[in-house]
Image (cartoon, rainbow, N blue to C red):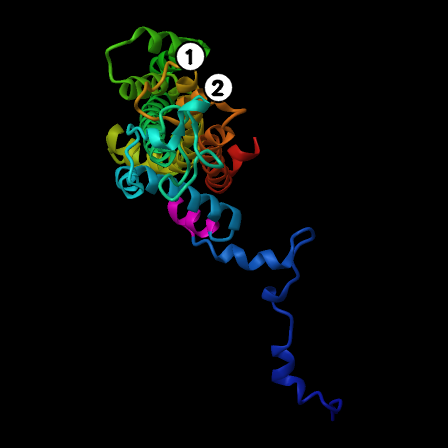
Amino acid sequence: MTTTAPGAAEQGPAGRDAAPTPDAAPPPDGAPAEDAPRTGDVPPGSSPWQLARRELRRRPAVRVSLCVVLLFVLMAVTAPWLGALGGWSPEEFDKTAVDPYLGGLPLGSFGGISPEHWLGVEPVTGRDLFARVVHGAQVSLLIAFAATAIVVVTGTAAGIAAGYFGGRTDAVLSRLMDLTMSFPSLIFMIAMLSVAKDVNRIVLMTAVIGVFGWPGIARVVRGQTLSLKHREYVDAARVGGASSWRILTRDILPGVAGPVIAYTTLLIPGMISTEAALSYLGVGVRPPTPSWGQMIAESVAFYETDPMYFVIPSVFLFLAVLAFTLLGDALRDILDPRGGRT
């Protein structure tokens, strides 16, 4: 006759339920316990935009940068209406806002800031700075976005073609990338923009900046394509009789979308700075069309007597470049973590 210890019967079902399970296993060494639930937040197969939206919600600084970027884009789109709301056009003179006996300096403090001129006026001419700044944002962002679109489309197409087809196609496109990157692009931009006279400056600047910017993204896309073209699903599509165009658009292009998006957002601040630098040097957008770089160049002569004329366009340029840079860095870390660490 066997006897059971007191309390053993009560531990039957409960004891079996209380046994340790694999789910209750402690996390491995070096991994914080609070990070474990986050792995389930990202469902498999998420698109780059879904992943970016999910991660951007967790970063307050990036949300602020995104808001600033959207504000600048909205300002550029609505520039004509914002200028009309202020009551002045960017080319309209207001001689009553400057003092002719003091070399045309703005009347009042802080560069002539008043209820009529929200950001003050331009010395000598009296043109409204608010109207010129918002229209300058339209010009700068238009050139930056258009040049970035040319760079991304050209670079992505060249990189995918070089990486997927290989052989002679890869050799020709790679040598063309090397030749373009070794060319003194800034000197050529200055020379070409100085020679061209009776042309649309915005179109010419967009084309010239875009021509010299595509090799960088082409190299990134080429490397990604080389790693994707031998994946199982690409081989299965090739064996199944899919055409090269279908494989490139259905299998390769979605695989390189993340790095391309991240690279695109990092290109925009560089394009804004390039346009501002060319306009500052006097070979970019010409008066009376406003531009931030052009306004900064004109304000150098008044930085002692009217510092606000120099500060206002400089602050707008600084905020735009900073916001796009922070947003681009965050998207690169999210969508292309390997490229962000290298």
Q: Is residue 169 shown above or below 9?
A: above
Residue that carries the numbered disc 1 in the rendered image: 185
Question: Is residue 226 visible to us here?
Answer: no
Q: Using the image as rendered, state which of residue 101 and residue 285 is in the foreground.
A: 101
Q: Using the image as rendered, state which of residue 234 and residue 222 is in the foreground.
A: 222
Quadrant hosting residue 171: top left
- Residue type at the position of mark 1: Ser
- Answer with left or right where residue 140 lies relative to residue 270: left
Q: Identify the image quadrant of the N terminus.
A: bottom right
Q: Using the image as rendered, state which of residue 247 and residue 331 is in the foreground.
A: 331
Question: Residue 136, image x and y in percent?
Answer: 35, 30
Quadrant hosting residue 93: top left
- Residue type at the position of mark 2: Ala
Of the residues tagged 2 and 1, which is closer to the observer?
2
- Answer with left or right where residue 83 lies relative to residue 292: left
Q: Is residue 307 shown above or below 195?
A: below
Question: Is residue 42 visible to us here?
Answer: yes
The local secondary structure at tag 2 comes to helix
- Answer with left or right where residue 25 lies relative to residue 143: right
Question: Residue 342, image x and y in percent?
Answer: 56, 30
Asked whether residue 72 is drawn in magenta, I would say no
Q: Is residue 179 shown above or below 80?
A: above
Residue that carries the numbered disc 2 in the rendered image: 301
What residue appears at the point 26 percent right and 37 percent down from the top-left corner? 80
Start-end of magenta stretch: 44-56
- Marks 2/1: CA distance? 29 Å
Main secondary structure type of the part rendered in magenta: helix
Q: Is residue 66 shown above or below 311?
A: below
Disc 1: CA contacts within 10 A as few (<14), some (14-19) or many (>=20): some
What residue appears at the point 28 percent right and 29 percent down from the top-left corner? 92
Question: Residue 306, image x and y in percent?
Answer: 49, 28
Q: Using the image as rendered, state which of residue 16 and residue 275 is in the foreground.
A: 275
